[in-house]
Every structure is written in structure tokens, then in C-alpha cells.
Image (cartoon, rainbow, N blue to C red):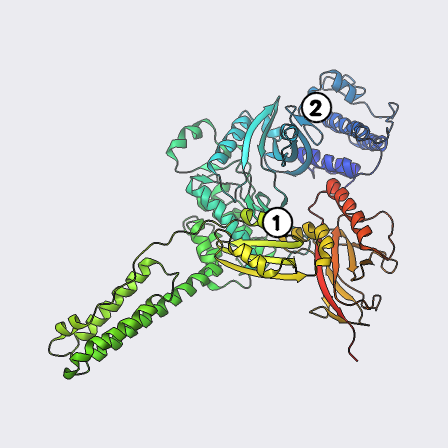
Amino acid sequence: MASLARVIHDFQNGELSRDEFVAQLDSTLTTEGVAPTQLLEMLGAAHRKAPLPDDLYVEVRRRIEQLRVSNVAAGGEETGIQTTVEIPSVRSASGGSLGNAANAASASGGAAHDQIKGTGDTLNNRFVLEECLGVGGMGTVYKALDLRKLEASDRKPYLAIKVLNVQFRGNPNSLVALQREARKAQVLAHRNIITVYDFDRDGPIVYLTMEYLSGKPLSQLLRTPGYQGMPVRAALPIVRGMCAALAYAHERGFVHCDFKPANVFLTTNAEVKVIDFGIARVFQRPEEESDATVFDPGSLGALTPAYASPEMIEHREPDPRDDIYALGCITYELLTGHHPFDRLSATQARNADFKLQRPPNLDAKQWRALRAALSFDRATRISSVTRFIAEFDNEARAEKSGTLAKVGLASFAVVCAAAVGVFALRSGPGRQSSVTTDAGKARSAVEPAATTEKSASAVLRMDTASAVNGSAIAMSSGPTASASPSSAVAALPPVAPPLATTPAPKPALTLAAVTPVLAQVPCSALSAAVQDHSLTVHGYVSQRYGVAHLKETLTALPGVGTLALEVEPLADDKCDTVKALAPYWVRNWQAGRVAELHVRPPGAQLNDGDPLVVDVSTPGYDSYVNLDYYQLDGSVVHMVPSPRAKDNQAPPHYSATIGSAGDWIISKPFGSEMVVLLITPVPLFDKPRAESESRADYLRALNTRLAQIGGKYGQDHLVADFAPITTKPRVP
């Protein structure tokens, strides 16, 4: 984290905007790790080199002094800010000295303070801004505590608040902008679009309240050092979520107009949420034309050149295909790790005659769809989001092709069976008595074939039956037909098509419905993924509960069509460990298994005297590796950190092999054991622990410490991975 002096320096050099400076100020002050007196000295030194604007200087000093108040309120010691600390005076616009600027501002009623709100401040005596989540084109977003919900003991008292940036606050249309955004949100109620509650103001501060999402923006994933794209199969759920949100908005007449990775949020529940419809504009909506004459959100000018279509840059009327261009850019970046046009604007890339490079692993139809989405001309750009995902989603196409192939085979069997019946009918004059028998055989052959594919629609079944009857008539009217073809055909009993009924649609299958069920499974660590009516579950469940019981429970859920279980049973003595660490394991899987643990050899079958060798990989951020071996005798061996491996700090995307020197050797007692990788943003414990200790004692200390780390630094960077192993005595 940058120091206060560095943040001030970056602002003065123009590397940070005013709002970015304010946002970084919050996180810097809370993580600087020095006393407020020293922070004031830093502020004074930086201000002497290059004076800050008066109101910003007042704001920085006020927030430093708030640290002392917060520390005392939390039960800490008085830090004793001295009034004699030398702070340079600031000159007012009229030339008069403000002296102690913070006190002067307070004495004047805090007019300067009202212009900026940040962490620690309260809006309308209700919303406490606790953490800056990000800075966007129109506003700064904070995690906020709703005191009214807290007072009512609401289980979810947090929400997100977008505070309109200072420059937009000066725009006379700023309040209208947020009012329109809240109104749009009521229209755009979709599982892949963030829920917006309301807008309000606190004096000159204009803000919007919305649901608080736990996770990270897609931009954070794409900017991870070393990120080089992901396989198509892994990217498809994200692409589907983006497409579902945009298609829904477009159907209701809205274009996002600032679609970019920062406005796509990946939640810890493995959901995709599109955020910030702040400058979304209406197209082809006559009932909204009166709004357009009053306020055009595009006039605020908040768009991102790298993802804006040529038409947006040229200020043409909005069109859904503008969002499709941005969608193509994001999809390309997701697959390859880099922008399709090296972050040039669309007009720059077009003028440079930039040639697109085909990403690997895309089939011809996928590449055709992506290339059409990235067209510089609306006329040749793919026409709709629905069409784009229909062509790009090869898994859905494969499923559809498989279903049609099955229906085709059933139809072919029906036609063949009918032909056999007709051939028997036409085999000679003296066979009239056997016609009924042969036709009955043909019908009995037809009926099972026609019903083999139960999932085929009623319309398909009726079309198949019609094709059968048509084939029989055509064959019996050929040149070798008997003298009375019409009577022969009439003698053939008709094939009765199955009753055409429309099956009741399956209820929707959502992760929100599955998650509470998984949470009720005792002694388990389970992560689910939902796609249409398919449910996939990874993880561990106790032997007592059983995988079969889990399968029965999940199959009974409404909307489940197919169920894939990749679940291992765990011995019941692991329940205390699983209970303590399951939330962090689940978070790891929901984030795409950003930390991984593998025991050698594959299969993790180890014999007496074998070395315990483990491969670990870390997430895309600086972290601390904690590796523990949970033994059958109720003890825990700390492999990292330990007296043998003291340094456990890891850079982003770090991979290491631990134990290859034979540091830990398998010995009795033998049975089902477990190795656990735990990733933390800071050292797990302040002091080294004994290399081996009681599991019960360690888990108590671990629970306490993880709660502290999560409360201070957030839960997002606390993840875990498990590796069950089986140890056995060596066979002579």
C-alpha cells in the first residue's frame, strides 16, 4: 500500500484525479501503521514541497485527526496529537491566513468538509461509510453500514453507496442523473444486474444506495499480473452472465453505454452482476422521449474509450450494438489476457487498419461471432446479444445438436419400420391374409422407436409420425405396386402418433436455492455451480452423511435436471477441521480455485517411510502460505511456517514444492489424514507456533485469528484448499 506522502505526490503530479486521491486516502491512512502525529508531519512536509488545494489539505488533516478519535472510541490508547506540530498555514482565496485549517473549517460550520465524504463519515445520520470499494466515472462507491437496519437487528445491515463525484455534483443535472439511474434500476430487475434501492442527498452530497456485493470486478481479474486468458469452457459462464444482463436491458429499451470490465462484478457466489447503468440511455422508447428532452445522461460524458464503439465516440444515437462492441472487447480480453486492439480506441484502431488476431481454441463459428461483435461498423456488427451468445456458446450448441441427433435417429427408425411394413404388404397377391399381422409388427416396431427420446417436444413427435405416413404412401404408389394400391394402403393400419402434450416447464434452478441446502449438510465443504437445469457440486462430505444421501437430497430440489457430483467422503473425525475451514475452501472454489494444493504422488496413497511432498500455488496477489498436516492422532504438524520453513510470504501466482528434501516422513498411526493449505493476506500468527500441537488447541486459536483478520482486512483474501491422504504401513 502506498504511503501518505506517495499518494499526495501522485495527486500533485496528475497521476491521481481528485476523487481517486480521496478514495486512496482512506485506505492509506488505515494501513499506514504510524501514529497520527507522524501522519501530520508527513502531511506538513509534502505540503511544504507543493501546496495542496485548501479544501483537500483541510480534508486530509481532518481525517488524520479522526484516527485518534476512532482509536480512543475503540478502547485504544490516546495517541496524543500535539497542537504544536508544525503545519504550514494555508492561504485562503482572499489572501488571509487560515492558520490551523482544520479548526478554522470546524469553526465555520464545516463548509469545506461538506464537499467531500469518505470513510468514517455518515450520510443523513444513517449510512456510515466504512470502506471505499472503487472509483468510477461518475462516483465513488463505498461499503456502508445502515444504522437503521443495525438497530432492527437485520442480518444484512450492509449496502453499497455511490457518492456522486465532485465534478458531477457541480453539474445541474447530477441529481437528475441519479434519479434516472434509480428509475432504470426498477425497470431492470434481473439476477445478472445489480439491485439499486434508491437515491437521496445529504446537503450537497448526492448518492445512490444499492445491494452490497461480495467478490471482485472482472477488471481486477484481467489486470492480475501474469494473466494470459482462460479456456473457453471456463470463460463461458461469465460470458453467459454478461449476455443475459445486456439482452434483458436491450429488450427493455436500454443501452448501457459504458460497458467495461470494471462494470462486470464476479460475486463470491459465482454469479455475474452488471453494475453502473448510470449513463444508460433509452433507444426506441416513445414513452421515454419526454425524459430525453429534459436530461440526456450521455451529456455527462462518462465513457471509456477502450470499450466504446466508434459510434459512441462520434456521439451518434445509442444502439444495442454499441454494447455488443464492448462485449466483444471484454470477451476477447477474457480469453487472451489482452485487449483486441491493444487498448486503442475504436476510431484509432479503425484508422490504423488494425487486424484482429484469432484467439486459440475458438472454433470457426465462435470466431465468426466474436469477429462480428468487434466490427467497427454497426451495419456489419452482429445484430443482437442473443444471436452472439447463440453462436458463441459452443456447449449449448453441442447439447442442442446431440438432442437433434437423437430425435433424428428415432425418426429414421420410424421410417424404416414403416417401410418394412409396406414391403411386406407389397410382397405378392396371396399374402393379403398376412397383411394385418405384418402391419401390426410394423406398428409395434414404430411405437417404441417413436417414444425413445422422451425429451423431444410434442411438435417433433407429431412431425415424425407425419413423415412415417407420408413415406408409406409414397412407397405404395411406385411402379411395382399391386393392382389396388389404394386398397393396400387402406388395409395397412394407421400408425397412431403419441398424444401431443406440452410438458410442464421445469422451475428455474438458481444458486440461491441450492446454497442454503448445501449449508445444512453437516460436516461438509461443498461448492455448487448452476447452468440452466444442470447442477454440479464439488467438495467433501462426511462418511456418516454419505454421498448417496447428498445425491438424493440434491436430486429432489426443484429445477434439477442433471446432477454431477464430484464429492469425496471424509472420515467423521475430520469434522472439526472441516467446520473451521469450510467457508474459506468454498470461497476459494467460488473464486475459481485461486489457490491449489496437491500431494505427491497423484492419488495421495502414502506408505510408512514415504516423504510427504506437497505442491502449492498461490492466488494473483501477495499472500502468506500456511500449510498444515492434520494427523490421525489428533495433532497438527505445521509444515509452513515452521522452524524448517520460516519464510511463508509469497508473491502473486507463486508455485512451490514443499517437503521434497524429506523434511516430513509418514509414520504410524495410519489411516485417513489431511493436508490443508490456508492463504492469508497477513501473517496468520504474530509469533511462531510449535512445529506440532494439539488439533483442538490449534483450531481454537485459528478460529479466533481468522475472525480478526477477516474483520480488519475483509474475507476475500482468506482462502483454503484441502488434500485428503491415505497412509498405510509398508508391505514387506
Residue 630 pos. (x, y %): 78, 59
Rendering quarter of residue 662: bottom right
Q: Please, what secondary structure does the residue beneath circle 1 have?
A: loop
**Callout 1 environment at 10 Å: few (<14), some (14 to 19), or many (20+)?**
few
Q: Which residue is mark 2?
A: 113
- Tag 1: residue type? Gln
- Tag 2: residue type? His
* Marks 1 and 2 close (CB-CB < 8 Å): no
Give the quadrant of the C terminus.
bottom right
Looking at marks 1 and 2 on the same chain, the residue that comes earlier in the sequence is marked by 2
Rendering quarter of residue 2: top right
Give the quadrant of the N terminus.
top right
Q: Residue at x 78, y 58 (%)?
A: 628
Taking the image as shown, residue 336 lies to the left or right of residue 480, namely: right
Would residue 229 be seen by someone viewing this image from the given angle? no
Q: In this rendering, is residue 730 above or below 354? A: below
For the residue pair 412 and 140, the one nearer the viewer reads as 412
For the residue pair 472 and 428, the one nearer the viewer reads as 428
Q: Residue at x 77, y 16 (%)?
A: 96
Q: Please, what secondary structure does the residue beneath circle 2 have?
A: helix
Taking the image as shown, residue 210 lies to the left or right of residue 57, namely: left
Residue 385 pos. (x, y %): 45, 49
Q: In this rendering, is residue 14 above or below 623? A: above
Q: In this rendering, is residue 295 above or below 133? A: above
**Callout 2 environment at 10 Å: few (<14), some (14 to 19), or many (20+)?**
some
Rendering quarter of residue 433: bottom left
Residue positioned most to the front? 544
Instruction: Identify the disc placed on residue 399.
Output: none
Mark nearer the viewer, 1 or 2: 1
Q: In this rendering, is residue 298 above or below 469? A: above
Residue positioned most to the left? 483
Instruction: Identify the disc placed on residue 520.
Output: 1
